[in-house]
Amino acid sequence: MEVRCLLNRLLLSGVVLTLVACGGPKTRANMPTEERFAYAMKKFKDKDYFEARTQFRIVILNAPGNTIVDQAQFYLAECHYEMDEFILAASEYERLLKLYPRSAFLDDAQYKIALCYDRLSPKSDLDQKYTLRAIEEFQRFLEDYPTSEYVEEVEKKLAEARAKLAKKEFDTGNLYRKMTLYEAAIYSFDDVLNHYYDSAYAESALFYKGECLFKVDRSSEAKTILETFLEKFPKSSFASQAQGLLSQIARGTGADGKNPQ
């Protein structure tokens, strides 16, 4: 982190000194690499991301052995990110990780890859392929950079992404439940409980699973689930309903309210 901060301070100082020496923000075909990089950084700071992107790319292509190329690669990706071109941005961040394994910007790049897919993640009722990819990249970040300054934010983002998947599966199960497709609902509630047991949807999923099992006359299984539910969530708003269902099971009363003969 200290190395990156020092680099950033040097870069900003270089931008000012170079532009003063050049008499202002200008570009030339034969501009030296460091001068072109300074110009690109000035454009980036001015939010002229299109021009900055062009200049960073020239630096990368024309000076592959220069010590500032990895920085040009990072800021090229940043330009795409700031322009909401998240697929392209992710590709450029990945390129930095692959080509510059000693760069001071590695954790920044991995963090931004995850953010790219997180930004592409839609509402919970839509296809969640980008959410799944974001989760994968956030997890990779935590494995590879456990001491990074971004860890706390990544953990928060990861929890939010997992909660979105939990909501999607829970809403699917609840829809099946309302349609009286109880077996399908049980399957979805099981998915919530198996994969997102730490989410806010686990409580409701566990109760509704017990209720659905009762509805399809799987009373023994329903009893186990409902008892587990009351043990884990004794103060739940569903507690009285769970007790009622257990009382019906104890009396041998089926979902239709009748005693089987």
Image (cartoon, helix red, strand yellow):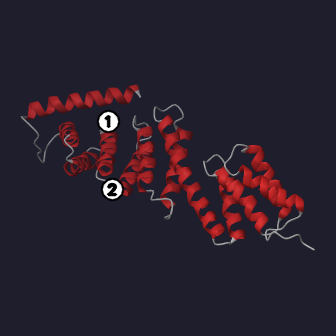
Q: Nearer the viewer, residue 171 or 113?
A: 171
Label 1 crowd bin: few (<14), some (14–19), many (20+), radius 10 Å: few
Question: Among all residues in the image, which is located at the extreme left?
Answer: 23
Q: Position of residue 169 (x, y in %)?
A: 60, 60
Looking at the image, which residue is at 41% across and 51% down?
116
Residue denoted by label 2: 85
Image quadrant containing the C terminus: bottom right
- On the rendered structure, is 239 left or right of 199? right
Question: Among all residues in the image, which is located at the extreme bottom?
Answer: 261
Label 2 crowd bin: few (<14), some (14–19), many (20+), radius 10 Å: some
Image quadrant containing the N terminus: top left
Question: Among all residues in the image, which is located at the extreme right?
Answer: 261
> Hey, which quadrant is residue 234 in on the image?
top right
Badge 1 amino acid: Thr
Q: Nearer the viewer, residue 245 or 194?
A: 245
Looking at the image, which residue is at 43% across and 48% down?
115
Q: Earlier in the sequence, mark 1 or mark 2?
A: 1
Looking at the rendered structure, which numbered label has been put on residue 45? none
Q: Secondary structure at mark 2?
A: loop
Q: Position of residue 129 (x, y in %)?
A: 51, 61
Residue denoted by label 1: 67
> Distance from label 1 to label 2 (Cα)?
27 Å
| Image mark count | 2
Does residue 86 sit above or below 234 in this rendering?
below
Q: Secondary structure at mark 1?
A: loop
Looking at the image, which residue is at 33% across and 26% down?
6
> Hey, which quadrant is residue 26 in on the image?
top left
Q: Position of residue 10 (x, y in %)?
A: 26, 27
Q: Nearer the viewer, residue 42 or 159?
A: 159
Q: Nearer the viewer, residue 83 or 188?
A: 188
- On the rendered structure, is 197 left or right of 36? right
